[in-house]
Image (cartoon, rainbow, N blue to C red):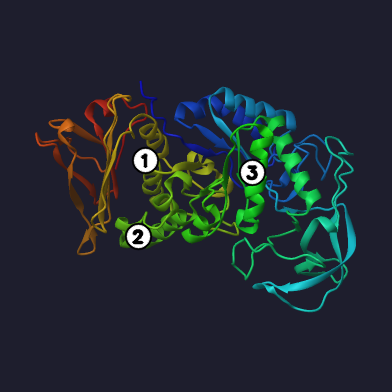
Amino acid sequence: MAEMQLNGTMLQGFSWNLPPDGQHWRRLAQLAPRLAEEGFTSIWMPPAYKGTDGVRDVGYGVYDLWDLGEFDQRGTVGTKYGTREEYQTAVAALREAGLYVLGDVVLNHRLGADQTQRVLATEMAQDNRNYAMDKPRPITAWTRYTFPGRNGSYDDFTWDYHDFKAVDYDVMHERSGVFLLDGKHWDEDVDRENGNFDYLMGADVDLHRPRVYDQLLRWGTWYVNETGVDGIRLDAVKHMSRAFYLRWLDDMRRSLGRELFCVGEYWSGYTDALLHYLGNEKAMSLFDVPLHFKFFHASRDGAQIDFQHILAGTLVDLDPIHAVTFVDNHDTQPDQALESTVAPWFKPIAYSLILLRESGYPCVFFADLYGLPNDGIPAVAELPLLLELRRRFAFGAQWDFFDEPDLVAWVRNGDDAHENSGCVVVLSSRREDGEAVLAEKRIELGAQHANERWVCVLGQAQEPIDVGSDGVAVFKAGKKSMISVYLREEAARSLDNIPINI
């Protein structure tokens, strides 16, 4: 018997402005059964280690990777999300519910050093990191990490300026900038923004220094084994040597003795840059940032949306196996440095494009699922229904009808393993005399669907659609809703979530 197809769905299990109450690990543990019931198969958890801002650090201002909320450092024992014990309990609960757990890994930079050191450095231009502003001169930099609160527990490695390439502040002259430490150089196999985008922030880790590489491999192996996570999300890989990750991931998998799923964040709207980083080795997957920007711009275009080409040239279009698709995340939400929030009205359309199609590994944003007032993000009311449609009905061969800019559709034909599976999705931005109109799309479903009745479960309320004896039917969308999703009548009657008709 053929193995039953499973529609993998990831949840980004946090947002930027969660309350710093130390309770999030407990919340995720309690949510575990519900998340599994909603159809999630994996969860990306926020960084678990101690950040420079203590309980207020989201986790990307890394201070000590070895402190998972266990030692009194940076003014706190627990992190923003809880303690080490609570983290391990949450991972176990999520895995027990059947979810694959991804830990967030930040290797590129350090913040919150314990001591300064006097070093030689050259200030580089912000917009061209290859251009030296002056000759090397002495500066005072925060580069000494001794972790006195941990006092050598788990690992006695301490960091000094030899272990870093660059810093962003000179204490001696009270000056911010990009300061390349004497004897160091930028890696070439990174993004070319600003000439060379090796440097991001804080104390930039020298990834190729032998003792540093050994430390990162030792920590990575310890972290995965100690916490029980199944895979990892890699932060800011556009600033990190591709050669480093090829080696580190290979050594990690060899050390662990198993496969380790990894998805990297390469924040670029240029698909060519992502494809180049993946290369022939394809050691990881990448988030489909170009697709996110397609959604963001479409949500601002309104009636001018070109649905025919909305997926063209994205990572899921060109390399669907290694594309993790998403609508928004913690970096794109309001008031963040990378703010590019998809407008609420467009999110049901965007989520249908990642949840109801066969390609890509979709990731749902925590704030979109539950709504978070602290982030100014309302819940997407249609998400529970879309998740159910993916979990139960979005199976089988996919037929695309992307032949008009303002009216497209696709069919998931269903399969024998999932009762009454199959769905039809129609997207329309068609207008006449400036007004939205109800548009019709003639779709050939095939002889196996002849004489069936299909019902609109999401979108504009309409009469049922009767498929002809030739397997052809006309499906509609537009006027009141740009999206319409149809199921077989029997499937619609069995829905757990109430159909949403506008």
Give the answer, above or below, for where 476 lies relative to 297: above
Question: N-terminal of the two: label 2 or label 1?
Answer: 2
Which-is-in-front pick, marks 3 and 2?
3
Residue 249: quadrant of the picture: top right
Q: Secondary structure at mark 2?
A: helix
Mark 1, residues whose alpha carbon is within 10 Å: few (<14), some, or many (≥20)? some
Q: Which mark is residue 249?
A: 3
Q: Amino acid at mark 3?
A: Leu
Q: Is residue 53 visible?
A: no
Image quarter of the N terminus: top left
Q: Is residue 392 visible?
A: yes
Which residue in the structure is indicated by mark 2?
A: 302
Instruction: Tell me the residue at 64%/37% (across/down).
Output: 253
Which residue in the structure is indicated by mark 1?
A: 358
Question: In the picture provided, is 171 more to the left or to the right than 2?
Answer: right
Quick one: which residue is furthest to the top in this view? Answer: 1
Mark 2, residues whose alpha carbon is within 10 Å: few (<14), some, or many (≥20)? few
x and y, in percent, of residue 369 in the image: 48, 39
Q: Amino acid at mark 2?
A: Gly
x and y, in percent, of residue 132 in the image: 74, 76
- Of residue 79 and residue 380, the one placed in the foreground of this image is 79
Give the answer, above or below, for where 453 lies relative to 331: above
Question: In the picture provided, is 331 more to the left or to the right than 183?
Answer: left
Question: N-terminal of the two: label 3 or label 1?
Answer: 3
Image quarter of the C terminus: top left
Q: CA distance from mark 2 to mark 1?
A: 26 Å
- Of residue 394 and residue 197, the one placed in the foreground of this image is 197
x and y, in percent, of residue 416 in the image: 29, 25
Which-is-in-front pick, marks 2 and 1?
1
Instruction: Tell me the residue at 38%/34% (across/down).
Output: 390
